[in-house]
Image (cartoon, coloured by chain):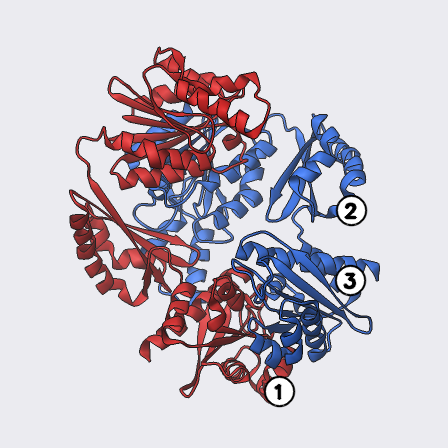
Chain colours: A blue, B red
């Protein structure tokens, strides 16, 4: 099956946003063995969109559209496609109910043009939108397939992942079984892991082995093709073994997990509570923890002590500590972690204090961070981390480092 | 002049990178009055690239290619275009000298395929590459123009900015002046603003008026074309007036600003300090504030009080308040905001308490959030917000709402 991805939206042609949707879909389609030969972007213009559809039909079996499903007048993707396919538009009751519910729930005023979002092409398979109002569609006509997805990536991606992907797989004549496994590594660079795994990477055919760096972590994606799920999985197991032998000390989890998710799993298993005192991270550690459902049994709360005043008033750091050692110090990190742990009688206290950047702080270069850890009845310690990123890169990396070192400490206990 | 941007590279079709080059060039071309009607992406495949060129010639005057100018075998953009135009390739002496210099300077070993990078299409205007080895080209043939740019953005952007842009402007018969202005709105939906502005949007010709929703906000982009910058700007001023009359109560800023940036600007102007007590947001408000350089004069720090225990122990909320009204209440929000403000003797205290979701809390549906605000010597209040997003969508939106309501309150003072 050959596919073309057609991004619809004048904002793309004006350079207001990049076509990240095409990137995402291309990666997903490659995984299920669908070949993408072209991306096209066209504006909110009926005749040019029609032309793009006709041209794409000459070179692709599957046309995937993103954008133009919203409520305003310049959203016209589905209308143009319906017209092109000579099909009517009908109201999808489920979508219409969902839109009405949304406005009821939020107490907001619903304008008339919102009903337009519930209109779908007749006989289309409706793809539910779990993160927005406009539903997606999958239409078969003759030898062609048409998939319509919303433009906002946070709506489009889960819709494709949860509904669109399977709709396409169902149409593939010979379904090869493709299984992927993502291994996650931390505290090692992409070049370093690529060197460690160079024999395996050079020899790869099936499964493929693809390291990818991103957001301070390295992932290695293994993808195996076979005639059955079982065989594909055993191919993955086979190739994972030597990878773990060579780089296992940096491995921390599979798939969509994160260092924070792994930390929460351990805290939950051991029924431990945690609290934090955050200076340069400014609440980011606790905010990321709070983003997970059901953390209330683990995270009690904590302190944001961005200023020295807050370190003293909210976290009882001794003024002498700040005078003698400064805020960017082992001593300060330990006092913060211990005091915040005691203030809520938690099992674990963690603290972050350092120079986020871009400027140095107290003579310490940007990226110098002390992470303090205090364990009930088991003492406290602090580790020094040095980073070379941007201000917010350093802040995000500090949070990851905090999770990483806590996991290491908890592993020993 | 109509342009089409053609990205060449299989890595784009596999989803390994996003086509940010097309975004950059689109913005640049819009500025000089060149209309971009299509983006195309095609792989490193001779016949499909040839087809894309032929098709683009039917709908554009200027074809801009990015990628495929490098030394390896799959870099074939210029060879295919030369072939298409029936022109020879010749060695560009300056580029060849530059490549040899590079290898001399770095002491690296030059492989034979590097000479290929100095080959250019005969009679092309050569665009120097100040950040890499492959030169760009600008070719006129009949009524069409062809611009070839390298793929890596850090080479492509300066080449276009310093040489390509002017080469195009030189060919424009009448240089139109284009000015854009982005208006940012909050607490109003895209459909609602489109309805409010429907007369203006329907009547638009010049300037154009384009609403766009994203991340809980709506922007309206105005773009005016005229013979001078001055005239374009007065066209923008003219059309902004009725827009502000109809939707000004939701307007909060221009261009790349954010609600947090606007709040920080006001705090800085008035030399006010702020602190926060965060329950469902879990530190997100303070973390977002900390992401900005130089907030230490404004943000002192604060409390994350995710559990009721933390509300009592860290923020002195009266247990009776939680028993009688619950955590998701006006009373709790006000106590949190007042107490956290007093604990650091700040000018402003803000608090967030509510049900992030997905589950309801104390009988309040997910998305019910109280935002408390306390002002030194000026009393406290709380506002109720209802949202219908995901857990993290609600948390992010709460932070924006907090900035929004604080801005409104500060506006009154």
Q: Which residue is mark 2?
A: A249
Percent position of residue A207, x then y: 71, 30
Q: Residue furthest right?
A: A413
Q: Which residue is mark 3?
A: A269
> What is the chain letter for disc 3?
A
**Would you place residue A352 above or below residue A27 in this image?**
below
Q: Tags 1 and 2 in contact by the CB under 8 Å rule?
A: no
**Would you place residue A147 above or below residue A289 in this image?**
above
Distance from the alpha carbon under mark 1 to that under mark 2: 47 Å
| Number of marks in picture | 3
Position of A387 with respect to B183 (left or right) is right
Confirm whether residue A287 shows in the render.
yes
> What is the chain letter for disc 2?
A
Q: Residue at x 42, y 88 (%)?
A: B377
Q: Tags 3 and 2 in contact by the CB under 8 Å rule?
A: no
Percent position of residue A246, x then y: 78, 38
Rendering quarter of residue B196? bottom left
Which of B135/B200 is in front? B135
């Amino acid at each position: 099956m050959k596919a073309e991805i057609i991004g619809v939206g004048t904002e793309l042609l004006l350079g207001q946003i990049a076509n990240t949707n095409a990137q995402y879909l291309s990666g997903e389609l490659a995984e299920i063995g669908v070949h993408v030969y072209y991306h096209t972007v066209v504006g909110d213009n009926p005749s040019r969109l029609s032309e793009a559809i006709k041209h794409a039909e000459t070179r692709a079996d599957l046309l995937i559209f993103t954008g133009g499903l919203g409520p305003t007048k310049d959203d016209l993707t589905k209308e143009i496609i319906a017209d092109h396919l000579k099909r009517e538009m009908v109201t999808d009751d489920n979508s219409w109910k969902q839109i009405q519910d949304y406005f009821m729930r939020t107490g907001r005023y619903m304008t008339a043009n919102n009903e337009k979002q519930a209109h779908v092409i007749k006989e289309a398979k409706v793809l539910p939108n779990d993160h927005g109002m406009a539903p997606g569609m999958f239409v078969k006509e003759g030898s062609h397939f048409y998939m319509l997805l919303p433009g906002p990536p946070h709506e489009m991606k889960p819709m494709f992942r949860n509904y669109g992907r399977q709709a396409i797989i169902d149409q593939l004549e010979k379904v090869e079984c493709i299984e992927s496994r993502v291994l996650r590594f931390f505290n090692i660079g992409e070049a370093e892991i690529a060197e460690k795994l160079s024999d395996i990477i050079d020899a790869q055919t099936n499964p493929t082995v693809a390291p990818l760096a991103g957001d301070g972590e390295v992932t290695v994606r293994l993808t195996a093709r076979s005639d059955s799920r079982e065989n594909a999985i055993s191919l993955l197991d086979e190739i994972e073994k030597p990878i773990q032998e060579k780089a296992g000390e940096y491995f921390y989890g599979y798939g969509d997990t994160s260092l924070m998710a792994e930390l929460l799993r351990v805290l939950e298993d051991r029924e431990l509570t945690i609290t934090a005192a955050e200076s340069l991270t400014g609440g980011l550690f606790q905010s990321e923890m709070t983003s997970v459902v059901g953390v209330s049994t683990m995270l009690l709360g904590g302190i944001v002590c961005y200023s020295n005043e807050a370190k003293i008033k909210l976290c009882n750091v001794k003024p002498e500590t700040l005078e003698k050692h400064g805020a960017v110090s082992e001593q300060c990190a330990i006092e913060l972690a211990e005091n915040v742990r005691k203030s809520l009688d938690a099992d674990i206290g963690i603290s972050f204090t350092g120079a986020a950047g871009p400027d140095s702080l107290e003579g310490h270069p940007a990226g110098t961070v002390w992470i303090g850890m205090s364990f009930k009845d088991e003492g406290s310690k602090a580790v020094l981390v040095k980073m070379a990123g941007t201000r917010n890169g350093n802040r995000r990396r500090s949070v990851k480092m905090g999770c990483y070192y806590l996991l290491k400490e908890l592993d020993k206990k």
